[in-house]
Image (spheres, rainbow, N blue to C red):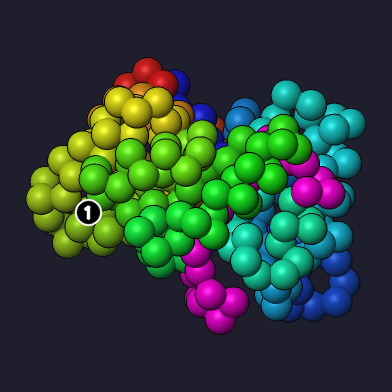
Amino acid sequence: MTHLSVNLNRVALLRNSRNIGIPSVTRAAKIVLDAGAYGVTVHPRPDQRHIRPGDVDELAALLASEYPQAEYNIEGNPFESPFMDIVCRVKPTQCTLVPDSPDALTSDHGWNLEQDSDRLIPIIEQLQASGIRVSLFMDADPAAMAAAQKIGADRVELYTEPYAAAFRAGTVDSILPQYAEAARAAQVVGLGVNAGHDLNLENLSRFCTIPHVLEVSIGHALMAEALEMGLFHTIKAYLEILSHGQPA
């Protein structure tokens, strides 16, 4: 079964719109984990528009004390301070390296390894020396997967916004094979495969026809759906879809 990691950024974004501490990021984490999510994801950006360093620490403490089996995934650009200081202090289960600029609205492309490999190698080595699994945020380009493995990554996270856009447009058959081929190319060279960005309750089932995807990270759409369904029941709906997908 493909695992579900719930991105909590939108909970923090709403919390930050007022100065009264609600909704609580840690409370949201407890709800999703109690509902059966495999783990939680946060993206602490330099401008602290949503997740703040204090949230990262509080979630680490919560998981260590109450959910030691849960995966903690921290994503972000390793070349933007203070990201690496935060990650190396907290030592999450997984760090997903994302090549977005500080002013990006959201992550919108994967790494260009022809350009960034030399810079990424020492970052990957530093994280792995701290016992952190490293995933690289990548476009669904089968030819790039060997390069990700060559520089030491443990996994890739396939950027799925183009898939989601094709699903909305009714043209998913034109792009899903590319994602399947990228996943196969990664698996052939020994990389684990994650996926994320704009996946939701409507398009997830079709994406899960791709075999052996280990994990999906979902935040914005999931929180929007939770406004109608409730957070606990939304997690259950995602897990029902994932339970019928291809085995991880």
Q: Residue at x 61, y 35 (%)?
A: 133
Locate residue 192, reporting x and y percent. Answer: 44, 30
Q: Is residue 165 magenta?
A: no
**Foreground pick, 53 / 151:** 151
Locate residue 102, reporting x and y percent. Answer: 59, 77
Q: Is residue 100 magenta?
A: yes
Specify the segment rendered in magenta.
Answer: 88-106
Compared with residue 20, is residue 109 higher up or lower down, i.e. above or below?
above
Q: Secondary structure at mark 1?
A: helix
Q: Is residue 79 left or right of residue 154?
A: right
**Foreground pick, 231 / 97:** 97
Q: Is residue 160 left or right of residue 179?
A: right
> For residue 61, what is the image quadrant?
top right
Q: Name the residue carrying label 1.
A: 167
Locate residue 52, reporting x and y percent. Answer: 78, 65
Compared with residue 99, is residue 182 higher up or lower down, i.e. above or below?
above
Q: Residue at x 27, y 59 (%)?
A: 162
> For residue 181, what is the image quadrant?
top left
Check disc 1 and give the amino acid type: Phe
**Foreground pick, 183 / 229:** 183
Q: Residue at x 30, y 26 (%)?
A: 188
Residue placed farthest to the front in the image?
Answer: 118
Locate residue 244, reporting x and y percent. Answer: 35, 22
Is residue 138 visible in the rendered image? The answer is yes
Within-10-Å neighbours for mark 1: few <14, some 14–19, many 20+: many
Query: Quadrant location of the C terminus?
Result: top left
Query: Quadrant location of the N terminus?
Result: top left
